[in-house]
Amino acid sequence: MFELRFFEIYRSQEYLSLLLDGILVSTALTIFGGIFGFVIAFILAALIYWRVFGISFISTCYVDFIRNTPLIVQIFFITFGLPALFGYVWPFWCHALLALTINFSGYFAEILRSGYESTPKGQIEAASALNLNKNIVFRKIILPQTIIKMFPSLSSQFIFIFLTTGIISEIGVTDLTHAGLFIDSRIFRSFEIFIVLTFLYIIMSLVYKSCLEIIFKISLGKRAL
């Protein structure tokens, strides 16, 4: 009869420390990748929305390329392809952060662009009638409504990227999945290890979701003031 032996994981301080370190690495890469990716996406989406000649086309091609290539391909290209082309050496976690940032930016840009496009035309025409310039219209009318309407999509994409960070273990980054695989190679209890990883990913995703909702509500409260 099959016996679950979770005690082989939690009885070892080393294994618990590895899992904690893995959670911290995955969290840090997700947060910083999300922040950097959102900043890039904000610029890309604005360029596409305002149809800046030439740059808008390049931005659209970039977004389509990122959204239509697998994350694992992007990670391997950035980790092994770019250093071979340009002759530089970075730690693996830097490559992982760059890959996540680029991947984030492509998906975030498309979400933001669709949010910009969904702004009622009547409001933009009314702002133009009041002789407001494009920058004010964008900052005061388009952007706030976009963030409010697109928040569920943005937060879902953020959590989705966190769930896919397990892929970065393929290049040697000591994330949560890498920690689980390391422990499995020592105790040979794959079923128990992946049950633990599953619950840890679920718990962390719920924590991220709650934190994002709190930040969103605080932002709305300040805006209301």
Image (spheres, rainbow, N blue to C red):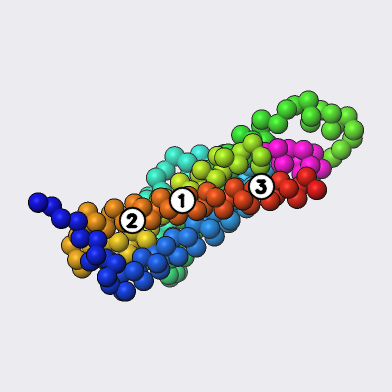
Query: Is disc 3 placed on a helix, strand or loop?
Result: helix
Question: What residue does disc 3 label?
Answer: 217
Q: Is the magenta stretch mostly helix, strand or loop?
A: helix
Relative to residue 207, is residue 69 drawn left or right? left
The quadrant where residue 93 appears: bottom left
Residue in the picture at 51% in, 39% down:
64
Residue in the picture at 15% in, 55% down:
3
Query: Label 2 near label 1: C-beta < 8 Å?
Result: no
Q: Provide residue 152's location: percent of width, then percent of height.
A: 57, 40
Q: Which mark is residue 197?
A: 2
Q: Residues within 10 Å of mark 3 (few under 14, many from 20)?
A: few
Relative to residue 1, is residue 29 drawn left or right? right
Q: What's the residue type where badge 3 is placed?
A: Lys
Q: Provide residue 26's location: percent of width, then percent of height.
A: 44, 60
Query: Label 2 near label 3: C-beta < 8 Å?
Result: no
Residue 195 appears in view: yes
Query: Is disc 2 placed on a helix, strand or loop?
Result: helix
Q: What stretch is highlighted in magenta?
A: 136-146
- Whole-angstrom CA distance, mark 3 to mark 2, is 30 Å
First in residue order: circle 3 vs circle 1: 1
Relative to residue 91, is residue 197 drawn left or right? left
Residue 77 appears in view: no
Q: Residue 205 carries which label?
A: 1
